[in-house]
Image: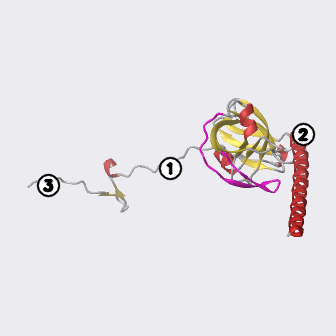
Amino acid sequence: MARKQRSRPQTGDQGHTWLDEKEREPPYQPKFHKCIPLATIRDVDTEMGSLNDPMVIRMNIANFTVHKVLVDNGSSADIIFKDVLRKIGLDEARLDPVQTRLVGFGGSEVTSLGTVKLLVSIGEEPKRKTTMVKFLLVDTSFAYNVLLGQPGLNAFKAIVSTYHLKMKFPTKNGVGEVSCDQREARRCYNLSLRKGDQEERKRKIESEMEESSNQKTSKID
């Protein structure tokens, strides 16, 4: 039975082994992954310095420009309020019946009405980014229209600097940027303080009324 002869490596004069072209391994070619623009914030990006203002921006939701959007890195949810949904004509939007108890609105607890997915855009062309964000719908009064929390920020792959009052995010045309509306931020902050004082007075009055009612009941007994 005939066997296929394999060519043997040829040895040169200096003892080096030479391989035929077919037996040589192809040269190593590194694989490059698609690069994502790196969003960074430098000291030179800031104009006014840190004023400890809340990060308040505007963004496009379902083709409507929505102001008074609070960017909150510490929030585990993205929240939109029922009155805002009504104003942009989406109060009849289909909701997923998810009830979540939220704490932090004036110290009281609020239960969400459900969740709604909306198309959200931030930034300006050509460095504008659009993605779908799932919001918790809440029916309560608040100084802000929308709260953009960790899920939404992660969806945009955004980084936020409260010192520079800027938010940056990668786009196909480079790094997009959104700056804080400081005047709006201060107005919202002052309004939230007033609302907090009102809630505190309301709770105090309710507590006093309840205490007075209990005293009357004990006297009747």
Q: Where is residue 188 drawn, in percent x and y?
A: 87, 43
Name which residue type carries label 2. Arg
At x 60% / y 46%, what residue is drawn?
A: 97
Q: Where is residue 39 drawn, in percent x and y?
A: 71, 45
Q: Where is residue 153 drawn, in percent x and y?
A: 69, 47
Left or right of 163? Residue 101 is: left
SS at circle 1? loop
At x 62% / y 44%, what residue is drawn?
A: 36
Q: Quadrant of residue 90?
A: top right
Q: In which quarter of the image is residue 182?
A: top right
> Cβ–Cβ below 8 Å for labels 1 and 2?
no
Q: Give the range drawn in magenta.
A: 92-113
Distance Cα–Cα, label 3 vs label 1: 38 Å
Name which residue type carries label 1. Pro
Q: Farthest residue toward the front? A: 220
Precedes in sequence: disc 3 or disc 2: 3
What crowding class fits label 1: few (fewer than 14 Cα within 10 Å), some (14-19), or many (20 or more)? few
Per the rendering, the mark at residue 161 is none
Q: Can residue 68 be seen in this view?
A: yes
Residue annotated with mark 3: 3
What crowding class fits label 2: few (fewer than 14 Cα within 10 Å), some (14-19), or many (20 or more)? few
At x 89% / y 67%, what residue is drawn?
A: 215
Per the rendering, the mark at residue 30 is 1
Question: Of tags 1 and 2, which is closer to the observer?
Answer: 2
Residue annotated with mark 2: 183
The quadrant of the rendering that contains the C terminus is bottom right
Q: Is residue 133 depicted above or below 101 in this figure?
A: above
The quadrant of the rendering that contains the N terminus is bottom left
Question: Of tags 3 and 2, which is closer to the observer?
Answer: 2
SS at circle 2? helix
